[in-house]
Image (cartoon, rainbow, N blue to C red):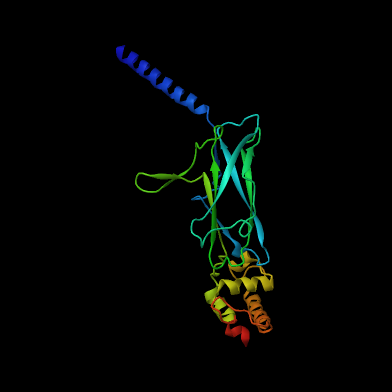
Amino acid sequence: MKYMLFIIVVGSILLNGCEKDLDTYEGGCGIYFNNNEMLSDTVGVAWGMLPGTQKTQTLTLQVDLYGTVAPYDRSFSIEVVSAEDDTLRAEEGVDYDAFPLEYVIPANEASTEINVPLLRRENLSEKPRRFTIKLIENEELRFLYSRQMMVDSVTYRPLDFQRVIVMTEDFPQPGWWSREGQSRFGDFSQKKASLICDVMGIDRETWLGPVGFDNFTQGYLSYVGKAMHQYLQAQDPPILDEDGDPMEMGPDSIN
C-alpha cells in the first residue's frame, strides 16, 4: 500500500511539473522561415537556368508562425545584410531592388510572405553575389523554433531565422555533351550553351535533359549545330567565348 501511495504521489508531482512547463510555453509565439525541405539556410538562385533576356525575377520567402494564431495583426521586421567579402557582396539596385523591411502576420493567419525582387547583374558569371535576410524577433514574435546545424561538437547554429541568397550564372554541362555534343558544338562553356539556347529558343530544362524525347533528338542537335555555326560566322565583330577566343562550333557543324 505504501508502495502504491509512493507511485501516486510521484506521478502527481511529475504531472504537475509537466503541466507547469506547458503552461509557461503556451504564452509564447514565434516566427521562422519555412524551410520548404531545404537542408540549410542558403537559397541558390541559378540565373543560368533562365533565358539571357530575362533580367528580373521574384524570390518568395515564407515566414511561418510558431504558436497560436491571433485575432489581430502582428508585426515584425527584417534586416538585409550584404556579404562581408567585397567580391561577393550583392548591391541594392544592381542585384536586387529595394523591398519592405516591415511585415505582418495577418489576423487569424499563420504565415506571410516576403517577396524579394532580384536583378540579373551583367557580370554575374565572373563572381556569384550574396546577401542575407534576417528576421528580427520582438516581444510578441520571438525565436522559439528552428532547425539546428552542428558547428562543432558542442555548438549548434539555428538555420531558420535567416536566409542567405546566393545568385550565380551556373548552367551545368548536359550529360549528353561528351557523347553527342562535343563533335557538334566543340568544347563546352556556359557562355556558349547559354547563347545556343537563346538563339535557338531552346528551353533550358529540355537542354539539360536526355536526348531522344519529344523533338529534342539527334537530328535536331545536328540542325542546331549547323545553324549556330552559320550564326557565329555572320557576327561582326565575332562573339568571344569565355577563354577570349572567337566562339566556334564543333567540326561536324562546320562541314
Above/below status of 52 relative to 111? below
Q: In the rendered image, which quarter contains the N terminus?
A: top left
| Residue 201 place in picture, x, y as percent | 69, 70
Residue 99 visible at all = yes
Q: In the displayed structure, does residue 133 sit left or right of residue 215?
A: left
Q: What is the residue that sits farthest to the left in this orientation?
A: 2
| Residue 184 place in picture, x, y as percent | 59, 80
| Residue 193 place in picture, x, y as percent | 60, 72
Residue plotted at (40% across, 18% down): 12
- Report the front residue among 112 and 197: 112
Q: In the rendered image, which quarter contains the C terminus?
A: bottom right
Residue 216 visible at all = no
- Report the front residue among 222 and 68: 68
Above/below status of 125 relative to 16? below
Q: In the displayed structure, does residue 149 sit left or right of residue 243?
A: left
Above/below status of 238 relative to 17? below
Snapshot quadrant of residue 20: top left
- Report the front residue among 176 and 52: 52
Residue plotted at (56% across, 67% down): 125
Residue plotted at (63% across, 44% down): 113
Q: In the displayed structure, does residue 99 sit left or right of residue 84?
A: right
Q: What is the residue that sits farthest to the top in this orientation?
A: 1
| Residue 89 place in picture, x, y as percent | 53, 58
Q: How many marks?
A: 0
- Report the front residue among 50 and 95: 95
Snapshot quadrant of residue 45: bottom right
